[in-house]
Image (tube, rainbow, N blue to C red):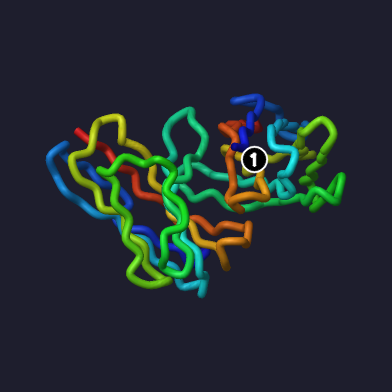
Amino acid sequence: ETGVTQTPRHLVMGMTNKKSLKCEQHLGHNAMYWYKQSAKKPLELMFVYSLEERVENNSVPSRFSPECPNSSHLFLHLHTLQPEDSALYLCASSQDWGTIEAFFGQGTRLTVV
Amino acid sequence: GENVEQHPSTLSVQEGDSAVIKCTYSDSASNYFPWYKQELGKRPQLIIDIRSNVGEKKDQRIAVTLNKTAKHFSLHITETQPEDSAVYFCAANPIAGNMLTFGGGTRLMVKP
């Protein structure tokens, strides 16, 4: 395994629920990312954290709220989501923000009902 | 910003044949072009990459070519095997921002 783990693997939530996705990496990397993968769409970068500071927010709705308490952990807090938010959410890490190769987690398959 | 287009979206080949997937990009400043393979239910994994100072790179049955003038790059898989069946993503990295922009993916099916 690549050392990037995501939990849960599957999540079904109602539109009024609040839930969190968790990502953990044991590669000693300094940058972590959240991507959204929808059917028939390119991977969309949502957030980037470098050394625990957010460096990129790609116009993501505020119902998605990231948190990076330390360089090994990344969370994505979800609240009042819409059905169109159903997708595979992938976490990735890289050595540094300027390092290109990304190592991906297995993703969380989110279904909003 | 960068825009990456990938074709075809699906590709079916017979085992042993070659497969070619093509990507175009818009930002001439992009200098790094990786390819990721995502098997069903698994994470994307880097399989090969190329930088703008190189025109071609090969790793066993996989090769990538880059044409900077035309702003396109391609993945070539020779002697395809059923285990090559997966979704393949190309990506490009514009210098500004240091983050990858992905193509839409190609679902490759290798028939035994």
Assess disc 1: are there few (<14), some (14-19) or many (≥20) residues with their C-alpha within 10 Å of its C-alpha: many
Left or right, residue B84 beside residue A57: right
Say if residue B16 shows up in the picture.
yes
Query: Which image quarter holds the N terminus of chain B?
Result: top right
Say if residue B79 shows up in the picture.
no
Query: Which image quarter holds the C terminus of chain B?
Result: top right
Could you say where residue B105 lies in the image, as x and y percent from the top left?
Answer: 58, 34
At numbered mark 1, what does the secondary structure look like: helix, strand or loop? strand
Residue nearest the viewer, comparing B49 with B108: B49
Q: Is residue A6 above or below residue B40?
A: below
The amino acid type of the residue labelled 1 equals Cys
Residue nearest the viewer, comparing B1 with B111: B1
Q: Residue at x 32, y 55 (%)?
A: A66
Left or right, residue B2 beside residue B68: left
Q: Tell me which corner region of the image, top left, top right, bottom left or bottom right, holds residue B66.
A: top right
Query: Subunit of mark 1?
Result: B
Could you say where residue B20 lies in the image, as x and y percent from the top left?
Answer: 75, 32
Q: Residue at x 76, y 50 (%)?
A: B50
Q: Residue at x 55, y 44 (%)?
A: B38
Dot 1 corresponds to which residue?
B90
Residue nearest the viewer, comparing B55 with A49: A49
Residue extending furthest toward the left: A16
Left or right, residue B72 beside residue A75: right
Q: Tell me which corner region of the image, top left, top right, bottom left or bottom right, holds residue A82.
A: top left
Could you say where residue B39 lies in the image, as x and y percent from the top left?
Answer: 53, 44
Q: Is residue A100 above or below residue B88?
A: below
Left or right, residue B46 beside residue B31: left
Could you say where residue A24 lies in the image, as x and y percent from the top left?
Answer: 39, 66
